[in-house]
Image (tube, rainbow, N blue to C red):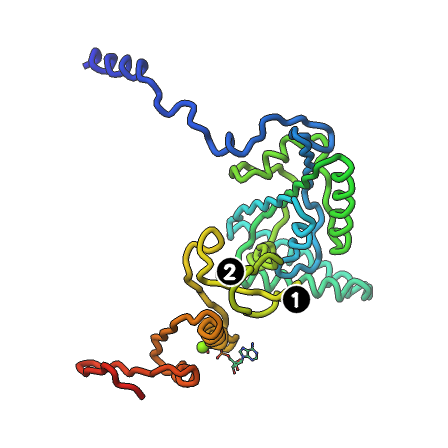
Amino acid sequence: MLEKQRKIKRAKKNEIDIFRNIPKLSNVLVPDSIQEFSDYTYLGHNKYSRQFAITVYPDQTWIGWLDDISRLGDINISIKVETLPNSSVINQLTKKLVQHQSQYQTYQKQGNIAHLPELEQMISDLEELRMLIQTNRDRLFFVTIFIRVNAKTKEELDAKTLLIEDEFAKKTAMVRCLTFRQMESWKNVLPLGEKPIQNFERNMTTGGIATLIPVSSPNLSHDTGIFIGRNIFTNAPVYINTFIGPPALPNPHVFVCGTSGSGKSVALKLMSARNMISNGSKIFFLDVEGEYAKLCKQLGGRVIKIRQRRNNRNKSF
Ligand SMILES: Nc1ncnc2c1ncn2[C@@H]1O[C@H](COP(=O)(O)OP(=O)(O)OP(=O)(O)O)[C@@H](O)[C@H]1O
Ligand SMILES: [Mg+2]
């Protein structure tokens, strides 16, 4: 028996590894050469890059607030999100809450009213967050954001650095250049799922993370197609051509979502009518509620009622 196992081991040792030298994702992403300096990296072929981490976050965030940064051009933003266990979050929130409440009472007894409104706000924010997490309506995460600025010359890199710092200052936030950690942070920006450099993480709720999603790209429009509206951030007209094909769109499907009464039906009716008028597209609605019957008639179409066990061919209403 032992002899048999040894034989198998020996056979395994002599086996040629057919998967050796198959490039990994990191091989594809890493450049031919990287030279590390204290506050920037040189990747050869006139490619300079500088890595930053966000150290102070804005007090108030809004959907797409990071887009102002990516709009400066040739910038990579890497957002690392780590989950935090709910039980530990609730414990810590409760401790903080008790601290603030006792502080509040002390100030009240001392007649020190200057800090009371601020503490009151903090207590109500903490209570609300704790309630949302307890009822499973929200979660707390650790977020680390790295920014890589790319440029063709060192001068351009310095000019872009000033622009970025300025843009964050406008948002009452701050970025820090990762001096002497450029190489480490360069790898952190790559989508390799590596653990981020520590001490730059910031706690954030689900809503906070949602604001980081890049939604307001000014390029969110096709060159052809029908006018669908205006970009709410840039006010630029947005055109959509569902039949534009790959690589812009792999298929012509459209998914419209929104809260009740937000205008989904209006958007669909508008798209159908404009597509029909401008491209001569043929439109069919499977309309359970008869919501599109009026539009169909206005566009010169036919409403066909389908009923069980009835021959409805060529029957119009
Ligand atoms: N772009 C718009 N400009 C002005 N009014 C609009 C616009 N879009 C929608 N509305 C108005 O908002 C109301 C609700 O729109 P609509 O019926 O399309 O919402 P919905 O999202 O389809 O709602 P539901 O989920 O209930 O079907 C309508 O009265 C419509 O006239
Ligand atoms: Mg509707």
Q: Earlier in the sequence, mark 2 or mark 1?
A: 2
Q: Quadrant of residue 160?
A: top right
Residue beneath disc 1: 235
Q: Quadrant of residue 17?
A: top left
Q: Quadrant of residue 155?
A: top right
Q: Is mark 2 within 8 Å of ligand 1?
A: no
Q: Where does the image place residue 78, in percent across and percent down from the top left?
A: 59, 44
Q: Where does the image place residue 213, in percent across and percent down from the top left?
A: 57, 55
Against 135, residue 273 (above or below) is below
Q: Nearer the viewer, residue 143 or 106?
A: 143
View extreme (bottom): residue: 317
View extreme (top): residue: 3
Residue beneath disc 2: 134
For the residue labelled by badge 1, is the local secondary structure a helix, a strand or a loop? Answer: loop
Residue type, numbered disc 1 = Asn
Q: Is residue 291 visible?
A: no
Residue at 43 percent across and 72 percent down: it is: 280
Q: CA distance from mark 2 to mark 1?
A: 40 Å
Q: Where does the image place residue 57, in percent across and percent down from the top left?
A: 69, 52
Q: Where does the image place residue 218, in percent across and percent down from the top left?
A: 62, 58
Relative to 146, 251 lies left or right? left
